[in-house]
Amino acid sequence: MLSPAVVTPAGSTPAEEIAAALDRIGPLHGLSFEERLWLARHGREVVANAGDILFEEGAAAEHMVLILKGEIHVRRQHGGPMALFIGRSGQMTGILPFSRMVSYGGQGFAVSPVWCLLVSRTLFPEMMEVIPSMAQRVVSTLLDRVREVTRIEQQAEKLAALGKLAGNLAHELNNPASAAQRAASNLLEALQANRSNRFKLVKLALNEEQIRGIVAWEEKVLTRTVPLPAPSPEPGALDYIAREESIRNWLTSIGCQEIWEIAAQLAEQCVTTADLDELRTILSPVETCISLQFFARYLRSARAGETLVNSTARIFDLIDAVKDYSNMDRAPILEVDVPTGLDATLRMLHSRMTHIEIERDYEPGLPRISAYGAELNQVWTALIENALDALGNQGLLRVACRLEADMLLVEIWDTGPGIPPELQERIFEPFFTTKAPGRGLGLGLDYAMRIVRKHRGHLSVKSQPGSTCFRVRLPLDQLQAY
């Protein structure tokens, strides 16, 4: 219902003047003056100032609105993805004949002085008799409106998917980037520390036998297999703590400085006091301390370098995953390796799978298919995200791919709660969703279905509590699909 504060008293503008203005309404072009005059006399004139609220979200839609002047914006207040709809001068909007619209989808307000004419829905039967061409005009307007709303909703769905993808990618890039930054900082500190230590090494003036002994000792330690660190209180962590403490005591006994730096690095390399006793047989206490300090800094630098290599390799892997996912710099239609596309999609969504077990089951030697690679990856994204939403923070996600007759079969399994039988036939309908408001538009599975059909394939679902499977069948011979 429109606010009475913005309704102009009846008769404030002559009906003939309103009828003349109605000729500027696009869908009404070609109406005779008498037909427009009927609308002017039976409609209700409304004016509003900029900022006035015209109707509230959820209010009953009772009028066809003919905007003669100004601009009306409609915004959703309760978490809807479509934030804005604009009605401008020359448009016919609101409830229309044949429309299933029941209430306003958002709050409407004037952004400039508005002059419009309202026609009550109770007058629609009479209007259709008086103006026979109105049926065709209304149907054309409704079709345009459906196309526009669908376009906006699809755009919102794509933006939401892009936002999720960007968030996942940012999370995945942040970890190796942070590790590389820390490693570079540690490497710089170790190099600067050893720069000041080089003169102490020169002053030792070690003989050839001592140098060969140190080199052999270091090689033995460096080639030692280092066990992966285990979280406390696992036995591996306790062993590491005991080993570091024994090294500290040993270093203290010979008067070493900066024990905290040496002991931690040697313990991580699995050096024991027996190893230190062996080194001590060829070096004096001072020589041992200086040599161990230099060696510990080398270990720290080497580990930092390895971290830099691994972190940057991980970043390049992610970049390759993005290229594989988006088929960047490739033709739209290409020979697609479906398992590679599935793996690229899993990598893009890896940040959401921290506590989820992933099982891959790809039949070896699968043939490539001619397809729109980027669009197929959007299908995998929609299906895997749907499975992740069902799983929450834990469960099993199984991705399988194999041949089935002359079709390539892809299965996405999850151990979530399942889809109720009464909803399984509806989940592929556009705008149907079981998610909370603002979490989805119900277009993901519809879009996936349309892409699969574009490839002359089939998309189906089989679900029961604890086991849901989406099956995509794609023909190997796609020659006639395009």
Image: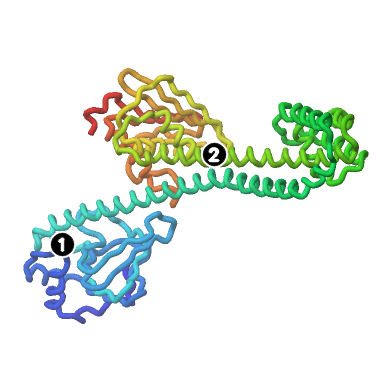
**Residue at the outermost bottom position:** 12
Q: Is residue 143 visible?
A: yes
> Which is nearer the eye, 43 or 322?
322
> In the rendered image of this protein, does residue 149 appear above or below residue 119?
above
Of residues 234 and 299, the one drawn nearer to the viewer in this rendering: 299
Residue 369 point in image, percent of width and height: 32, 27
Type of residue at label 2?
Answer: Arg
* Residue pictured at 35% horizontal, 61% vertical: 84
* Residue at image mark 2: 314
At x 73%, y 30%, the residue is 222
Q: Report the side of 234 relative to 82 (left or right).
A: right
Q: Quadrant of the N terminus?
A: bottom left
Q: Is residue 242 visible?
A: no
Q: Secondary structure at mark 2?
A: helix
Q: In the image, residue 258 lies at what x, y percent?
A: 83, 46
Q: How is the image coloured?
A: rainbow
Which residue, as the protein is rendered here, is positioned at the far top?
405
Q: Are marks 1 and 2 in contact (CB under 8 Å)?
A: no
Is disc 2 surrounded by few (<14), some (14 to 19) or many (20+) residues within 10 Å?
Answer: some
Task: Name the amino acid, label 1.
Answer: Pro
Q: Where, by quadrant of the figure, is residue 268 drawn? A: top right
The image quarter containing residue 331 is top left
Residue 162 point in image, percent of width and height: 42, 48
